[in-house]
Amino acid sequence: MTTVPGHNIIIQQSGAAHELAHQSHTPKPSPEQAAAQQEANVLVKNTTVQEFDEAERLKAKKEKEDLRKRQQMEKAKKKKQQEEMDLDPDATGRLLDTTV
């Protein structure tokens, strides 16, 4: 048995109708909540900046250029260290060839 909202009537239902009547319904938000949620969605939409493919390409190009510069600097640093090692035969880490 079920009641009709707003009326004092009790109705007896069959099994299938009874199962259908007791399915949970989603609660509807109040108009104030709906308006506040819509306003928040509009605010988020208006504050989001869309990125263009061009900006992404420029960013990737800059990262690639920075990586290339770092690699060149490391290569130059290693070359300089190697030159310093070659110039000083008594430097630490070098083998000394002695003949008696």
Image (cartoon, rainbow, N blue to C red):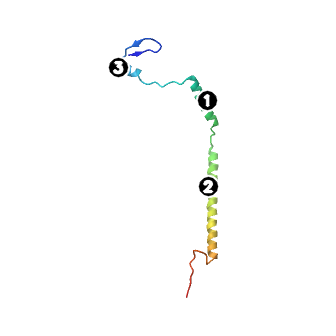
Vertical comparison of 19 with 55: above or below = above
Name the secondary structure under disc 1.
helix
- What amino acid type is highlighted by mark number 3? Gly
Could you say which is closer to the camera, residue 58 or residue 92? 92
- What amino acid type is highlighted by mark number 1? Glu
Q: Quadrant of residue 51?
A: top right
Q: Marks 1 and 2, Cα distance to the nearest angstrom?
A: 41 Å
Q: Which residue is mark 3?
A: 15
- What amino acid type is highlighted by mark number 2? Lys
Vertical comparison of 78 with 53: above or below = below
Residue pushed farthest top?
A: 8
Q: Which residue is mark 1?
A: 39
Q: Earlier in the sequence, mark 2 or mark 3?
A: 3
Residue under the point 62% across and 49% down: 57
- Total label count? 3
Q: Quadrant of residue 46?
A: top right
Residue under the point 58% across and 24% down: 32
Residue under the point 62% across and 59% down: 68
- Mark 1, Cα crowd under 10 Å, few <14 / some 14-19 / many 20+, is few
In the image, residue 74 lies at what x, y percent?
62, 63
Name the secondary structure under disc 2.
helix
